[in-house]
Amino acid sequence: MKMKSLDELKKLREKAQETIRLREQEEGTKIVVGMGTCGIAAGAREVMLALVDELQKKNLKDVVVTQTGCAGLCEKEPLVDVIRPGEPKITYGYMTAEKARSMVTSHIVNGQVIGEYVIAREDSGD
Amino acid sequence: MREIALHVLDLVQNSLRAGARLIKVEIVEDTHLDSLVITIKDDGCGMERALLEKVLDPFTTTRTTRKVGLGLPLLKMAAERAAGELSIDSKPGEGTVVTARFQHSHIDRMPLGDMAGSMLTAIISNPAVDVVYRHRVDQRAWEVDTRTIKAEVGEEALTLPVVIQWLKSYLEQGVSYLYGGVVENEIS
Ligand SMILES: Nc1ncnc2c1ncn2[C@@H]1O[C@H](COP(=O)(O)OP(=O)(O)OP(=O)(O)O)[C@@H](O)[C@H]1O
Ligand code: FES
Ligand SMILES: [Mg+2]
């Protein structure tokens, strides 16, 4: 087995900077995963890892995945918010790694919200 | 929670909420001493003595979203079930150190679980905060420091799929080395 090294990271530098420049030109999509204690216990880590893996596989460079703390919606965890420029914020509940992957294909790539998983909608103007 | 690694991720959330800029996660597994110790040290806001004294009571929380704080009491229970203990050292304005010790071979000790996954999650979702992860299993030790990574590619690169993919493999190989994974070249 050959270890990944920091040298390999150096080689990614240019590619990374190019993508960052592209990102600066237009507002991208933000995905936010709830990471409170119940979120973590309910599988938020697996959801987060599935999301970043799927974005990598689909080469979706302008989507950022980030986290937030407890939202007080314990029983619906893991929660995932999708914020797309000019669209209302969509909150998905009871997420799993698998649901997160289909959400990327349907919502992020094809713009089709998966109504079945949605627990809240909120206007971006708020 | 089913894994110590999930508790670690949860403690990192406490540190983040305390406004930490640097979070140090250390795991030491010593099979001769038969111990597994996790330490999370942050430079966040710290806790006043009064809060510190009652923080292991589940009815203590400073969060506003609900009335109970579960993170620390749950970890305390998990440690005590495995003949271990939890201790917290904290100074307002300086930071907090949470240490949980487990008897390594105890039948009721939770598995360590996916540390690479927990650390990846903690690092990529908070690129502005620095994280050091050190892990030792008897003679083998490994560490990653996000400050080194940022020095190479910059902070924002930690949100890019290609860099995340690299970090994922880097963490997974680092952890597998600790448990006897074969290494061809030296880890830099
Ligand atoms: N690293 C830390 N720095 C400063 N304060 C802390 C830290 N860790 C815990 N605390 C304080 O202790 C309280 C209890 O923590 P605990 O993790 O048990 O529950 P919580 O974080 O409030 O809720 P939960 O973990 O269930 O989401 C917190 O609300 C916070 O005020
Ligand atoms: S994570 Fe459960 S109520 Fe917040
Ligand atoms: Mg907590």
Image: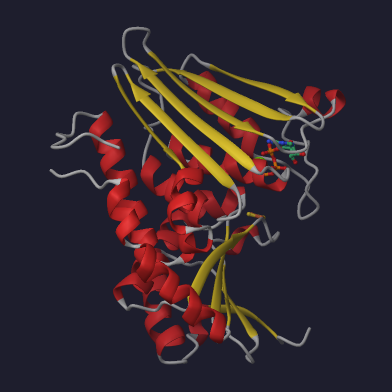
The answer to whether residue B31 is seen in the rendering is yes
Residue at image point 47% right, 92% down: A111
Residue B12 locus on image (x, y percent): 58, 42
- Tell me the quarter of the picture where residue B43 sits: top right
Closer to the camera, B144 or B9?
Answer: B144
Residue B69, compared with residue A108, is above or below; it is above
Q: Position of residue B89 (x, y in %)?
A: 70, 21
Q: Is residue A98 visible?
A: no
Q: Ligand 3, what quadrant?
A: top right
Instruction: Answer left or right for B122 relative to A126.
Output: left
Where residue A50 appears, as percent x and y from the top left, is 38, 64
Position of B40 relative to A84 (above/below): above
The residue positioned 58% from the left and 61% from the top of the image is A67
Quadrant hosting residue A121: bottom right
Quadrant location of the C terminus of chain B? top left
Asked where in the image residue B115 lies, by quadrant, the reply is: top left
Of all residues, the one furthest to the top in this rendering is B33
Q: Residue at x 49, y 21 (%)?
A: B81
Count of numbered tags: 0
Residue A96 screen position, x and y as percent: 42, 65
Residue drawn at x 62%, y 26% as measured from the top left? B98
Q: How is the model colour-coded?
A: secondary structure
